Image: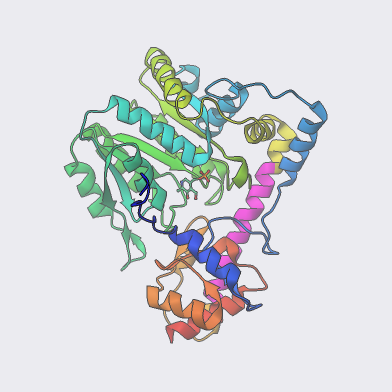
Amino acid sequence: SSLFSAVPLAPRDPILGVTEAYNADTRPTKVNLGVGVYYDENGKLPLLECVRTAEDQLNALHAPRGYLPIDGIALYDQAVQKLLFGAQSPVITGKRAITAEALGGTGGLKIGADLLRRFTPEGTTVYISNPSWENHRAIFEGAGFEVQTYPYYDAATHGVDFDGLLKCLKEARPGSIFVLHACCHNPTGVDLSPEQWTQVLAALQAAGHVPFLDIAYQGFGDGIEEDGAVIRAFAATSLPFFVSSSFSKSFSLYGERVGALTVVLSDADEAARVLSQLKRVIRCNYSNPPTHGAQVVQRVLNDDTLRRQWESELGAMRVRIKAMRKALVAGLAAAGIDRDFSFIERQRGMFSYSGLTADQVEALKVDHGIYAVSSGRICVAALNDKNVETVARAIASVLA
Ligand code: PLP
């Protein structure tokens, strides 16, 4: 027997499993609402025009591919900070923020988790929302933390269990790490209001917790500025915090792995020391990040014309998702469903916790070839004018 003869088979990824089953389905009317990507009105993954132009410009340069610095492309890191905080922000001018290019939002979370593990006391707990993007738990447990959940989604109101959340913030051991979705909560689509964020921020400060903001859907909620407001509210305090950025969705650059980790510290000196430690973390993980995706994003963010084009293309994605939320709610009503589904229109971002049970999700799949996550999460960005009525009728029939 070999060293590996007793290795158990790991469980399948629940969401990728949905897509495998969808791919094997031969019904022409099948729809995959289980995905975590934005599809356009033709059900296709878009290549943004701003990306195409930036890539054409880059291609024409035929630039050599040397190693990047450990923290990535400087112009990219600066562009990330300006996007998060605004160009004139005191955290930028005061050099309190450090940013390293990372391999997607996942990479930003991972290097942030590794860094925190090195400098937080043994036994520090990481709190993630209940529910959360499933990789949050895996990433922080993988880095050596104990992970617990804070109350978040309240199925009864399709809103936030805000009292539960505040209570947890107050009762958690001071110095705990709180992973927070800055906008467009995945998987529920339910965000905190600005007033609630103010209270959360005060509770985090009072307890000396470490906030770790995850921003993977900036621009999909109410707008690029609007969706970044939470980050700027944190930056206006003296509280140190972490941010992982992902451009996978907002640039439709999933496979290029473009993200970043930003840490805001107390002063420039502390920031320089933390950056030196972050570089050590990166060095022993993957040494330095890849060139292409960050070069594309940097070009778009730093060029006035491309930037405007990106804002307009991202705006169109946002508007289309909102239109699909509306069409789904209208479709359900038209299919004779009395139940109030208006909460779907109030949710933000690509996802909706639809309220469907695991049995109803199963019936959607078996009877209609419509695939969703067993939690009831559907990707609204997978809906389009051609399939939304079919989906609404199918949901109506499994609810009946
Ligand atoms: N954080 C959240 C909340 C996400 O939903 C995702 C992607 O689904 C990520 C992070 C990771 O993004 P990336 O694909 O850039 O690693």
Whether residue 17 is situated above or below residue 265 in the rendered picture: below
- Relative to the observer, which residue lies in front, 217 or 7? 7
**Residue at image coords 37%, 31%:** 114
**Could you say which quadrant of the image residue 303 lies in?**
top right
| Residue at the front extreme, as displayed | 1
Whether residue 276 is situated above or below residue 362 in the rendered picture: above
**Residue at image coords 60%, 79%:** 390
Q: Position of residue 221 (x, y in %)?
A: 52, 52
**Residue at image coords 39%, 12%:** 269
**Could you say which quadrant of the image residue 159 lies in?**
bottom left
User: Is 259 displayed left or right of 206 in the figure?
Assistant: right
Q: Position of residue 18 (x, y in %)?
A: 50, 65
Whether residue 102 is situated above or below residue 247 in the rendered picture: above
Q: How many marks?
A: 0
For the stretch drawn in magenta, the main secondary structure is: helix
Q: Position of residue 373 (x, y in %)?
A: 45, 66
Residue extent of the magenta highlight: 310-330
User: Is 155 displayed left or right of 324 in the figure?
Assistant: left
The colouring scheme, among rainbow, by chain, secondary structure or one colour, is: rainbow
Image quarter hosting the C terminus: bottom left
* Residue 394 is covered by the magenta coloring: no
- Relative to the observer, which residue lies in front, 176 or 319? 176
User: Is 300 displayed left or right of 175 in the figure?
Assistant: right
**Residue at image coords 35%, 41%:** 142
Q: Position of residue 111 (x, y in %)?
A: 43, 32
Whether residue 282 is situated above or below residue 362 in the rendered picture: above
